[in-house]
Image (cartoon, rainbow, N blue to C red):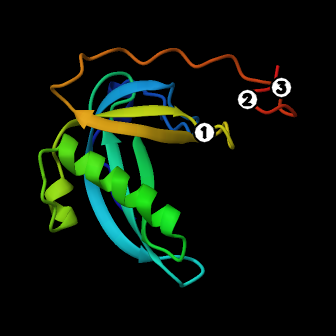
Amino acid sequence: MPTIDFDVTEYEAQPIRSSWEPLPPGDYTACVTSTELKATKAGNGEYIELTIEIMDGEFSGRKIWERLNVNNPSEQTVQIARSQLNQLATALGQVPLKDTDQLLEIPFTLTLDIDRKDNTRNRVMGYSSASSAPRVAAKPAPAAASPNKKPWEK
């Protein structure tokens, strides 16, 4: 059993901040902290999983995971994923991209929205150079919709 060699009452109790709520739509300064190539659940393709961390502001430290299906039976899925990878590499000044390690730890502007199919998740809308866009505070989240209605339904 570990012995504690300090008086815990000398320290102010801080609330543990762990929220699985989606971030409000808007632009965030972020960086890719890890990349991993994984097989799809169906076993017929591969995706690059990006771990993206918000770097500043109220949501500093929050993470977003993005999956880019770079090898898939659906040519449209591959086209979309590779286009998004190109947009990220371009925003980071890493073109041509030869290795996903080139994406790591470079600040960029991440644009997020609420996923229209699942309003409990964020959707990555784009990547841009950290210097190309003014820093704008994230917009407040819209009022929660009725649990039985889709976010676009009134």
- The secondary element bearing badge 2 is classed as loop
Left or right of 17 on screen, residue 130: left
Amino acid type shown at disc 3: Ser
The residue under label 3 is: 146
Amino acid type shown at disc 2: Pro
User: Real-space Cα distance between discs 3 and 2?
Assistant: 8 Å
Q: Earlier in the sequence, mark 2 or mark 1?
A: 1
Query: Quick one: 2 or 129, which is closer to the camera?
Result: 129
- The secondary element bearing badge 1 is classed as loop
The residue under label 1 is: 115
Vertical relation: 67 (above or below) 16: below
Left or right of 90 on screen, residue 72: right
Query: Quick one: 86 or 39, which is closer to the camera?
Result: 86
User: Real-space Cα distance between discs 2 and 1?
Assistant: 9 Å
Image quarter in which the C terminus is found: top right
Image quarter in which the N terminus is found: bottom left
Q: Earlier in the sequence, mark 1 or mark 3?
A: 1
- The secondary element bearing badge 3 is classed as loop
Identify the mark at residue 151; answer none if there is no mark: 2
Left or right of 76 on screen, residue 89: left
Vertical relation: 99 (above or below) 42: above
Left or right of 20 on screen, residue 53: left
Residue displayed at 12% across by 59% down: 96
